[in-house]
Image (cartoon, rainbow, N blue to C red):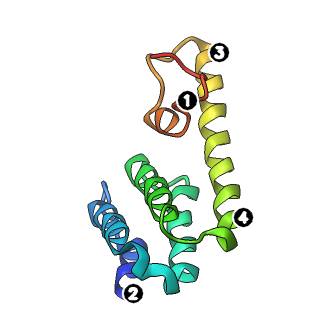
Amino acid sequence: MPYILQVFHQDISEKRIPTICTLKTLIVFDTILDDYLHVIVPQIVNLFDLNEIPLDVRIAAIKTIGSLTENLDFNNYSELIIHPLIRCVNLVTSKQVTLSSTGSVPGVSPLMRFLMPSWGLYKI
């Protein structure tokens, strides 16, 4: 487990492909990770909470949390996940409102499309 989590800290590549691959690996491990959630969840949440993380990695981190919640008990980690997720949504929403008020929005950001597909906040 330490080697897997080390990738999140030491990957400084531009697109962070190793980090995305590691997130996909965690999805494959699924129920095996039950005893390690207290270590894994904060690391994954940091990936979508930090603004300097590339957009593809942030989306992959949110998808990973979503996939893991299907088979694992995340009741003890809800606060840890919800607050950063709300900050992420607020950031995307505030950027969207700012851009749309200037009239310079060619489309909706990919993170906005991922986070709010059914909320009716955008039209494609």
Residue 33 placement, left or right of 12 = right
Q: In which quarter of the image is residue 118?
A: top right
Distance from the alpha carbon under mark 4 to that under mark 1 = 23 Å
- Residue at 52% across, 34% down: 112
Pointer 3 local density, CA inside 10 Å: few below 14, some 14–19, many at least 20: few
Type of amino acid under label 3 = Ser
- Secondary element type, mark 2: loop
| Circle 3 residue | 101
Earlier along the polypeptide chain: callout 1 or callout 3? Answer: 3
Q: Name the residue beneath numbered marker 4.
A: 79
Q: Where the C terminus falls, by quadrant?
A: top left
Q: Answer above or below: position of 15 versus 94.
A: below
Q: Is mark 1 on a helix, strand or loop?
A: loop
* Mark 4 vs 3: CB contact within 8 A: no
Numbered disc in front, either 4 or 3:
4
Q: Position of residue 30 (x, y in %)?
A: 39, 72
Given residues 1 and 94, the one toward you in this image is 1
Counting residues from the N terminus, which is met first, the one under dot 2 or under dot 1?
A: 2
Q: In this view, does 103 lie above or below 29?
A: above
The mark closer to the camera, 2 or 1, is 1
Between disc 4 and disc 3, whose residue precedes?
4
- Name the disc covering residue 118, or none: 1
Q: Do the residues labelled 2 and 3 touch (CB within 8 Å)?
A: no
Sequence-wise first label, 4 or 1: 4
